[in-house]
Image (cartoon, rainbow, N blue to C red):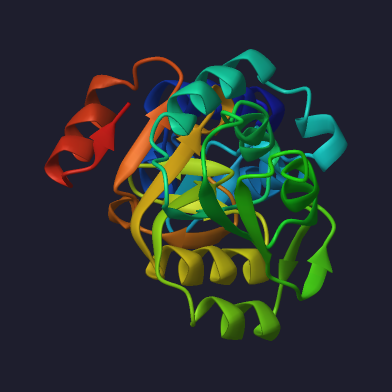
Amino acid sequence: MLSSQRKQQILVLLAQEKQVMSRELSLHFGVSEDSIRRDLRELAAEGLLQRVHGGALPVSAAIAPFETRKNVQIDSKRIIAQKAVQLIQKGQVVIIDGGTTTAEMVKLLPQNLAFTVVTHSPSIAVALVNFPLVEVIMIGGVLYRHSVVAVGTAVLEAVAHINADLFFMGVTGVHQTAGLTTGNYEEAGVKRALAARAAETVVMVSQEKMNSASAFAIGELSLASTLIVDGEPDAEMCQVLAEKHISLL
């Protein structure tokens, strides 16, 4: 079998199984693990999978540029946003992450809902200008352009003084073994810090993010109190969420 044919079959297996292991692929194709690792390296270089220790996971489509992502799975994001808004109650302190799904969420906020938003996203803060009952606390730092959010030491220092009711977290991947992931090291650290300052963390998962992974781990699935998902996750994922006592909307 040619290497190109083998790589196509690896992608088919990955789509079916949501994870592939180098040793198992070596036995399946009757080639050395070195050959499989070379295949995985080449597929990863093409952006077709995410390599992890011992194998590979499906790569998240949510690592595209911000302007591109605004038009990806837009209906899915709006459905999730509608559910998310219903979780916010009057008087709460709510941390809102940057991202295209949270951008859809703030559009749907009721004009008569009075609460406090903490955000490190300038675009989220600007979107709340026309909501006079919403107090907005902006957290500044170094601008990470891909997600249009602030990152760095200044952000971490500021969030240490906040106790929030909810944190609406954006991620690029949700996978039962890789957990919650994103495409930038600094951003992953900020998301962990924000989750640590909230009583509940709500992860908003549009369809392209489920069962996929990016390079940097935010944390295990148990970091989330609730997942809001468009559509029913597969049975295996549902079982994992139930075992970890993570609510599914």
Q: Residue furthest left?
A: 243
Q: Is residue 214 left or right of residue 80?
A: right
Q: Determine which quarter of the picture holds residue 75.
A: top right
Percent coordinates x, y for residue 201 in the rendering: 38, 52
Residue 214 relative to residue 227: left or right: right
Q: Look at 72% across and 23% down and name the residue there.
A: 72
Q: Is residue 245 visible?
A: yes
Which quadrant does the C terminus fall into? top left
Tell me if I can see residue 65 in this picture: no
247 relative to 88 in the view: left or right? left
Q: Where is residue 2? Give x, y as percent.
A: 67, 27
From the viewer's side, name the closer residue of 22 and 107.
107
Residue in the image at 76% along x and 76% along y = 141
Give the quadrant of the N terminus.
top right
On the picture, is 195 further left or further right than 223?
A: right
The residue lying at 82 percent from left, 67 percent from top is: 143
Vertical position of residue 223 compared to residue 57: above or below: below
Q: Nearer the viewer, residue 59 or 155?
A: 155
Q: Position of residue 86 (x, y in %)?
A: 41, 29
Residue 196 in picture, x, y percent from top left: 39, 70
In the image, 162 versus 115, the foreground residue is: 115
**In this figure, what is the number of numbered marks?**
0
Q: Quadrant of residue 209?
A: top right
